Amino acid sequence: MVEATLFFSPHQDDETLSMGNAIIEHVEKSDTHVILCTDGSKSIIRKVLDDGGTCSYHIKDIHKYSLPEEEFSKDRDEEFKDSCKEMGVKESNIHIEENRAHDGELSKEKAKEIILKYLDKYPNARVKTVTPYKASGIHEDHRALGEAALELYEEGKIKDLRFYVEPYDYNDFTKVNPNVEVWKVLNSQENKLLNAMNAYKKWNPENGQYAIGYHSVKSHFDELKENKIQYVHTP
Ligand SMILES: [Zn+2]
Ligand SMILES: [Zn+2]
C-alpha cells in the first residue's frame, strides 16, 4: 500500500505559498492529499474588489465586483483547487473540508477534529501543516492548526509531523525561535510551482476569476517566484 501524506492548509493560498514545493515533492512518492480548513471568507479583498477603484495589479481595470461572502469564498476555492491540480494533486485528493471553519474562527478543537477525520481514513499518514511556534503576527487560524497537530503528535495520534514556516515569516521566525532547527525544501519542479502560483493570478471576472490570492498577498507571491524555497522543522 502506498503511504498517505496529508497537507492541512489554513486558507486558500497557504498550501502553495508555504508548502508548495513539499506538495510537489510528495505527490511523486505518496498518496498526497491537501485539505482546506477554513472558508477564507473574511479577506479584505472582497471589499477591494467592490470599491470601484483600482489596485497596483490592475492599472486599467476598475474594480466593480460586489461578491457576497459565500460566492467570494467559492471563487477562492476554485483558485485553491486549480493550484493543487497544477502541483499534481489528484482531483479526488483535493479536499474542501465540509466541516471547515469560517475564516478567523478556526479553533484548536475544530482543527483537531478535522485532522482526526482524515487520520481515521488514512491511518499512519504523514501530516504536514504550518508552524504553531509564534513568530510575530502569526495568524490565529495558522496557530490553531499548528497547535492542533502538535497536540495530536504529543498524544501519539500523529506519527510523523512536519511544520512549515511561511517563507515571508522566516526571518521573524528565526529571531523569535532561534533554537528551532529549520531546513529548506528546494524547488525540484519549477514549472509546477509557477503554474500553481498562477492559479491565484487569474483575472477574468466574467468567469468568476478575480485573482483573489494575488490581490491579497501580491508581495508573498512575487517573493516566492524570486526565491522558490520552503522552510520546514520537526515538532
Ligand atoms: Zn493563511
Ligand atoms: Zn485589482
Image (tube, helix red, strand yellow):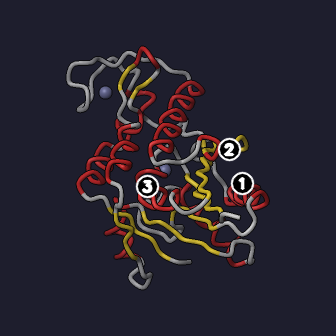
- Is the Cβ of the residue at disc 2 closer than 8 Å to that at disc 1? yes
- Give 103 or 71, whichever is nearer the viewer: 71
Report the disc number at residue 97: 2
Kindly state the secondary structure of the residue where label 2 is placed.
strand
Report the disc number at residue 73: none
Q: Residue at x 33, y 17 (%)?
A: 52
Q: Amino acid at mark 1?
A: Ile
Q: Is mark 3 within 8 Å of ligand 1?
A: no
Q: Which residue carries the number 3 mark?
A: 20
Q: Is mark 2 within 8 Å of ligand 1?
A: no
CA–CA distance in space, label 2 to label 3: 19 Å
Q: Residue at x 57, y 57 (%)?
A: 7
Q: Is residue 21 above or below residue 157?
A: above
Kindly state the secondary structure of the residue where label 1 is placed.
helix
Q: Is residue 180 above or below residue 18?
A: below
Q: Amino acid at mark 2?
A: Glu
CA–CA distance in space, label 1 to label 3: 21 Å
Say which label, 1 or 3, has the lower sequence index.
3
Q: Quadrant of the N terminus?
A: bottom right
